[in-house]
């Protein structure tokens, strides 16, 4: 009996750098990443790296996200003192990038004079 992978499981790559991804942390990452696929189903792959950086004299979690999609890839990074807060902020930032990317062609289509002014 084989189970087919969900679309999220086949598109999501989670990686912990200097930190082990516990089942709770992995579940939180998967739950938050579902929001990105809800907005843009044509995403090829989402890679999220969570790094525990201790080099600055304090514990800092750096969450990095990379979304592979048709056209330019979207990349974001967030530094925070707690892992779950860093994940929340990263997903919010990636969500804003996806929305901005989706609204740009619509804005150009509805306001063609703005492009003509930018070219001159």
Image (cartoon, helix red, strand yellow):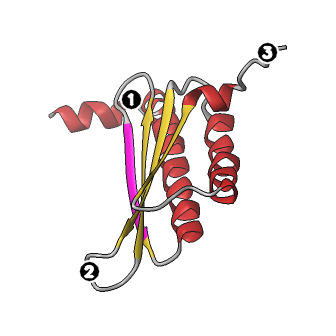
On the image, the x and y values in percent for residue 107 come to 47, 36
From the viewer's perspective, tell me whether residue 34 is left or right of residue 93: right
| Residue at x 79%, y 15% (from the top left corner) | 2
**Residue 7 is a magenta residue:** no
Which one is in front, 110 or 85? 85
Q: Quadrant of the C terminus?
A: top left
**Which residue is situated farthest in the top direction here?**
1
Magenta range: 74-79
10 Å crowding of disc 1: few (<14), some (14-19), many (20+): few
Q: Earlier in the sequence, mark 1 or mark 3?
A: 3
Q: Which of the marked residues, 3 or 2, is nearer the chain's N terminus?
A: 3
- Identify which residue, 34 or 107, lies in the foreground: 34
- Per the image, the residue denoted by label 2 is 56
In the displayed structure, 20 sits above or below 106; it is below
Left or right of 71 in this view: 1: right
**Residues at marks 3 and 2, CA–CA distance in whole angstroms:** 46 Å
Percent coordinates x, y for residue 23 in the rendering:
68, 54
Q: Residue at x 63, y 51 (%)?
A: 26
Nearest-to-viewer mark from 1 and 2: 2
Q: CA distance from mark 1 to mark 2?
A: 48 Å
Instruction: Name the quarter where the N terminus is drawn.
Output: top right
Instruction: Say the numbered circle drawn on residue 112.
Output: 1
- Mark 2: which secondary structure? loop
Instruction: Name the residue carrying label 3.
Output: 2
Answer yes or no: do the residues labelled 1 and 3 have beta carbons within 8 Å?
no
- The structure residue drawn at horizontal position 53% and vertical position 68%, both measured from the top left corner, is 83
Q: Earlier in the sequence, mark 1 or mark 2?
A: 2
* Residue 81 percent coordinates (x, y): 47, 78
Tell me whether circle 1 and circle 2 mark residues in contact (CB < 8 Å).
Answer: no
Under tag 3, what secondary structure? loop
Q: Does 76 lie within the magenta span?
A: yes
């Amino acid at each position: 009996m084989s189970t087919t992978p969900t679309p999220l499981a086949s598109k999501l790559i989670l990686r912990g750098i200097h930190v082990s991804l516990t089942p709770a942390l992995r579940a939180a990452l998967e739950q938050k990443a579902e929001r990105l696929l809800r907005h843009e189903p044509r995403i090829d792959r989402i890679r999220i790296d969570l790094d525990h950086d201790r080099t600055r004299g304090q514990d800092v979690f750096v969450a990095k996200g990379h979304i592979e999609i048709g056209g330019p890839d979207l990349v974001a990074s967030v530094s925070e003192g707690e892992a779950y807060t860093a994940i929340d902020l990263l997903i919010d930032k990636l969500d804003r990038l996806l929305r901005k990317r989706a609204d740009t062609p619509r804005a150009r289509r509805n306001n063609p004079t703005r492009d003509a002014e930018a070219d001159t």
